Amino acid sequence: MDPDTSRNIALILGVLTLAVMVYFITQRAMDNRTEMLESNAPKVAGEDELAGGARNPQQFDEPDEDALNEMADLLGDDEESTMES
């Protein structure tokens, strides 16, 4: 086979491979961009669902002693604040 013919075939195969790679990369980039825009779009009230919740919601029914003391401190109803007034 002639060296020029071999070089031309290799060149054509290289260009075709490059074209196919560029095509697939641009398609993937456009798909990723579309997916990113959809996932980061502003949420409309009622369309977004929040997952999760308390594992044991009954723990909030009755406050414990620490919570009551902290609430008294925040409200200023502890003994020190009433003595100072």
Image (tube, rainbow, N blue to C red):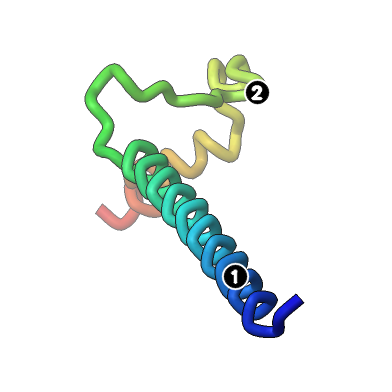
Nearer to the camera, 26 or 46: 26
Height in image: 17 above or below 72? below
Of the two numbered discs 1 and 2 in the rendering, the one whose residue sits closer to the viewer:
1
Q: Which mark is residue 55?
A: 2
Nearer to the camera, 16 or 64: 16
Residue type indicated by callout 2: Arg
Q: Residue at x 65, y 73 (%)?
A: 10
Q: Which mark is residue 14?
A: 1
Q: CA distance from mark 1 to mark 2?
A: 59 Å
Of helix, strand and loop, which one carries label 1? helix
Of helix, strand and loop, which one carries label 2? loop
Nearer to the camera, 50 or 20: 20
One can see residue 31 in this view: yes
Judge from the rendering whether residue 46 lies leftward or rightward of residue 14; answer left or right: left
Q: Residue at x 69, y 76 (%)?
A: 6
**Dot 2 crowding, Cα within 10 Å, few <14, some 14–19, many 20+:** few
**Residue 17's spot in the image, x, y percent?**
58, 62
Residue type indicated by callout 1: Gly
Height in image: 82 above or below 56? below
Q: Which mark is residue 74?
A: none
**N-terminal of the two: label 1 or label 2?**
1
Height in image: 23 above or below 4? above
